Image (cartoon, rainbow, N blue to C red):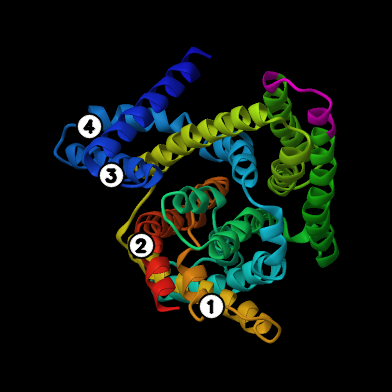
Amino acid sequence: MNETLNLAAILMTLSALFSYVNHRFIGLPTTIGVMLIALLLSLLLILIGELGITQFEEVAERALLSVDFDETLMQGMLSFLLFAGALHINLSDLRQQKWLITLLATIGVLMSTIIVGLLAWLVLDWLGIGIPLIYCLLFGALISPTDPIAVMATLKSVGIAKSIETKIAGESLFNDGVGVVIFLVIAGLAMNPDQVSFGSAALLFFQEAVGGIVFGLGLGYAGYFLLRGVDNYQVEVLVTLALVMGGYALALAFHLSGPIAIVIAGLLIGNRGRVLAMSDQTREHLDTFWELVDEVLNAVLFVLIGLEVLILQFTQEYLIAGLLMIPLVLLARTVSVALPVSLLKLKREFSPHIIKILVWGGIRGGISVALALSLPPSPMRDVIVAMTYIVVVFSIIVQGLTIGRLAKRVQREI
């Protein structure tokens, strides 16, 4: 217990220090800035270690090895971050984009999974790192969904049109839940091929995804009725905390999609609950509370992502594979976005640059890293983790820092 407390204290201190340095001297968006500083610190420790001074690197590695990244994010931070993000999405704006978001979060993720998986299989075989096709599809499943945490943290720092923001944020909130379900299905096929049939895979997908939606609706309405019955912001903040923590735990216990359930509940509380069940004072305190939770957890998460490079296994072949996967993942994203948009163009108008914005705004983040690290130890896991980390770092830093400029430039051309 004392070790856990010490580790949490170290992470919080580093997050505060990096945030301060970024705010005072660098000026990048907070999440990107703290991750970049953490990454540079990690590379500095590795360089010092190569010079023979290994004490600092060893201490950092021991501390990071004691952190289960998958457990910390998927079972801890994720529910809070998803709820905080969904709380501020306007439901009427979301309804206007419902067909595009639905197609991108389902068919788009599935298409990208298959394309990335096949391309990764060919590239790795060409590099002499042949791994079974099913594991390449597993990589496709974990890297295809855009990360709502990374996306929404980035969107806060750039001024883009509301309709575009709704498309990008709405897709990211739902496709991570779908992506996790696809990942679980393919992982089951990879680990226990004799125990997984098409029927059982379809049933798992239905149970997780549809069950998560239904459970989220029940959770959201239960929270709404509780909020409507009291006018005390301290109690109402506690109700939302219980909704997030208890609801996520119950969803996982019932083998339902916790991410989807929390997003649905957050949308209900942020729209119906905000308008009909809260006073102005409660709205102000609730928004302030969840904004702080969002900012603090995001800072800690992105520091962890930056430091994680210290304990990953990189070889020259893995590095080349990861760098080659960057354009291939973007290619798969382009195809999986262009097809749904082209289909919907038959019935409605889109901005001429919408595909560019959606492709470049599809930022990957900590969820992909967490899923990769959740795989059991094996040579396949090492290459998947290395490729995932390289794609994620590129996505957060390069795409995250340029999506605002791209959006503003194409808006001027419209």
- Label 2 secondary element: helix
> Residue 54 shows which numbered tag?
4
Question: Is residue 141 visible to the viewer in this orientation of the structure?
Answer: no
Residue at the farthest bottom position: 346
Disc 3 or disc 1, which is closer to the eye?
A: 1
User: Magenta stretch: dominant SS?
Assistant: helix
User: Which image quadrant for residue 141?
Assistant: bottom right
Q: Which residue is mark 3?
A: 27
Q: In the rendered structure, which amino acid carries the disc numbered 3?
A: Gly
Q: Residue at x 33, y 30 (%)?
A: 60
Q: Could you tell me residue 8's position as x and y percent?
A: 46, 23
Q: In the rendered structure, which amino acid carries the disc numbered 2?
A: Thr
Q: Which badge, 4 or 3, is on the more N-terminal residue?
A: 3
Q: Which residue is mark 2?
A: 402
Q: In the rendered structure, which amino acid carries the disc numbered 4?
A: Thr
Q: CA distance from mark 3 to mark 1?
A: 31 Å
Mark 2 surroundings within 10 Å by alpha-carbon count, few (fewer than 14), some (14 through 19), many (20 or more):
some
- Label 1 secondary element: loop
Q: Residue at x 31, y 46 (%)?
A: 36
The residue closer to the viewer here, 136 or 338, is 338
Q: How many marks?
A: 4
